[in-house]
Image (cartoon, grey):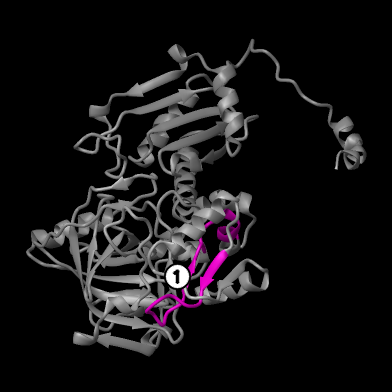
Amino acid sequence: MSQDLRDFLKRLEREGEVKHVTEEVKRAYEISTLIMELEKEHRYPVMVFDKVENSAFPVVTSILSTRERFGKGLGVEASKVSETYAERIKKRIEEVKVIKNPPFAEHCITGDDIDLYKLPIPIHFPIDAGPYVTSGLCVAKDPVSGVETLGFHRMQLKNKNTLGISLHSRQRLWEYFRRSEEKGQSLEAAIVIGVHPNIALGSMALVPYDQGKYGAIAGLFGEPLEVAPCATVNLQVPAYAEIVLEGEILADVREKEGPFAEFTNYACYRSTENVFKVKAIRYRQNAFYHDLTPGMSSEHITVVAIQREGDVINALHQTLPNIKAVHAPFSACGLFHCYISMKKIAEGQPMQAIYAAFAVDHNIKMVIVVDEDVDVFNEEEVLWALATRLQADKGVSILPQHLGMGVTLDPSTDELSRTSKMGIDATKPLSGFAPKIQLDDEVREAVQRLLKYAK
């Protein structure tokens, strides 16, 4: 399987999923506003902006907007994406394949020639503090174990060689930087822009701190990850990235960053206020700039939801039989709520599933468990189960706010980013419950001939 985003986009182009805007667009607001307008119409084409003001680089966006596209990256149907992710992310491949002369080595800018303003970094929303790199995956190594990580972090353009970066997830990169700063050292890092969807998806994986992300990503491809060395920092990055920014996150330096339009559909003023200093810009011939529309957009949320579903599936399968499906709905930003369907064979299993899901990720605030006859990807059915199978005094469990760790970007958390959590058992009792109305399968098949009269 090709690990090059360009090959993936060529396939989408052949299949008619790519649309080109040939007239010049402004950096401020126009790109993100068009994408959000298309999403209101439930349209998710990959958009290529051939001409962006004051830049020689075209912008490509909406690559990661749909489950169908992630399915194409994994080679499966859209309905199988989460469970495929769950299976493959466990099949780590530790070896990497080193590409000595990667495409991004074609151009290298260093020293006083570095100028981030030449990249078409957009301003996405009026609330934003300035232009933001949104699709950049930050690569770094743990200064203790030496294992690598990469993940999405928002980055504000500050000047020609500086980005403000927030490590607000309080997870791997934040911890690696903390360890480095504790030693009085800046943390070497590289920002990769424009990578295959499998790399974007695998970057979200929850793996132990003593294991690298590359092994998990390789599992999604089913082969070693192809990487290449940086020129100015001791790191290896995905070999087919369109653009690579090499540099370091500065120790003992903090600078105001934000606000920024986050996936919650709110402006976020919270930030760790870190600073990334660029040492080199490297890019491919005819490179394009991948922009990920922030805010509550499909491209911002879908990748998070798939990862969340897959990791919860894996956790549930360790202790519970008969799990049918897991869904992290768009309505909860792909992060805060989790719907689980299961065939209950013993009372108490739904609550076991709820706390297993909470243990996977501190971002989850509410878990709803329903029976296997409820489609968790259809939110109306989940709400129907709540309406007809739940008695709140028996089926609802609440963890108080002072006990629950939340996510900094959630505006409802307290000043310490703590959140309450709620688990809901919306399953039927094992016996004595009203039967669900069903249609006769033979008659359903027979009336297919009559559907033409309703067209």
Residue 383's x, y, as percent? 56, 27
Residue depicted at 36% across the width and 66% down the height: 136
**Quarter holding the C terminus?**
top right
Q: Is 235 or 10 nearer to us in this picture?
A: 10
> Up-down: is 169 above or below 376?
below
Residue span colored magenta: 46-71
- The picture quadrant where one finds residue 441 is top right
- Looking at the rendered structure, the kind of residue marked 1 is Val
Residue 319's x, y, as percent? 46, 35
In the image, is 436 to the left or to the right of 444?
Answer: left
Residue depicted at 53% across the width and 17% down the height: 390
Secondary structure state at the residue bearing disc 1: loop
Residue named by callout 1: 195
In the image, is 248 to the left or to the right of 51?
Answer: left
Q: Is residue 3 visible?
A: no
> Up-down: is 314 above or below 255?
above
